[in-house]
Amino acid sequence: MIKLSTLILEDKESPKAIVMAGGAGSGKTYLLNQLSLDSLTQFNPDKYVEDKNHPYYNKLGPASNQTAKDAMAAAEEGKTFVWDTTASGVGFQKNLDKMLAAGYQVYMVMVYAHPMISYVSNFMARKRNIPGDSVFATWRNVYTKIEDFNRQLKGNLSIFVSDRGGKYKKEVEGFDTAAKNGLSGVKEYLKNFNEKNNVGGSSFFKPVEMNSEEEQEFIKHAGSVDWDKNNRSEDKAIKTTFLKAYRKNGVGPGQDKLKDAVKKYREKSLKRKEDADAVLDNIVDMIYNPTFQEKLQHSTPREIDQKVQAFLAW
């Protein structure tokens, strides 16, 4: 395969990439549909997630990883394309660095939405939902990098501030009011919101499937192990440990290992809660930080389209 660097050196006009970036539920697809980019190849994990015949159907992680591979394969071929991504992870940054180092030209369209708009959109305006903690983590991770992206792309960045037409004004105001009381206020607000609307979980969660024989053996082997059967993730952790041993050896792993699986799950769960609290604490600071708010220089869809078309034509 011809390397990306070789293609760039051989081509006087460097190929280009348009990156549609932003948190989950921010409105990237809405904006993309208003830009004149239909002629370009587009990479979006939804292609796999929504395809019932694909192995990555309803599997966002693998679908996102494959989409990144698809985009980089297109880059190796020197194609100009559109990449729809949160742009929030280490993997994206590495791929962006690789493209820029090889001479690729990249324009980023950052779609910004208030954290509560992203949260509500994820659960109430989409058929598929990622966990609430992931919504906020992605939000924090991508929007804290606005300045870094702008500097790295030498100003080739536009921001579209989406308020979803004021559809979630009540929820935004509720979040902001709660944020005045810090982390505890936001956590209490989200707890009440989740309970009232029965949201907060993930549609991507897949429970452990057992046949009747495995179920009977599991019950027998679990014995006196104490685990929260109503916690679907903890239940999955202990059953996964059992099945791994049972399907390989024909016997269960023993109660000590099952107890250890529960212990490890709870330790990881506690760490995740601590991380989630840290993310929310960061978000509270960001929405009331004038320096951060000044970075959100809104451009209209028409203005962004004009800038993107000029970038592609250059």
Image (cartoon, helix red, strand yellow):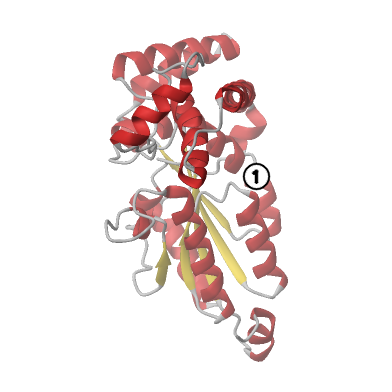
Q: Where residue 167 sits in the image (x, y, percent)? A: 30, 30
Q: Where residue 311 sits in the image (x, y, percent)? A: 53, 70
Q: Where residue 245 sits in the image (x, y, percent)? A: 52, 40
Residue type indicated by callout 1: Lys
Q: Is residue 206 visible?
A: yes
Q: Which quadrant holds the N terminus? A: bottom right
Q: Is residue 153 above or below residue 88?
A: below
Q: Label 1: which residue?
A: 145
Q: Is residue 116 above or below residue 102?
A: above
Left or right of residue 11, residue 43 in this image: left
Q: Is residue 120 visible?
A: no
Q: Nearer the viewer, residue 115 or 72?
A: 72
Q: Is residue 183 above or below residue 16?
A: above
Q: Residue at x 64, y 62 (%)?
A: 96
Instruction: Sort mark 1 into few (<14), some (14-19) or many (20+) by Cα contacts within 10 Å.
Output: few
Q: Residue at x 52, y 34 (%)?
A: 241
Left or right of residue 54, residue 98 in this image: right
Q: Residue at x 49, y 37 (%)?
A: 251
Q: Which quadrant holds the C terminus? A: bottom right
Q: Is residue 282 above or below residue 84?
A: above
Q: Where residue 209 sits in the image (x, y, percent)? A: 35, 38
Q: How many marks?
A: 1
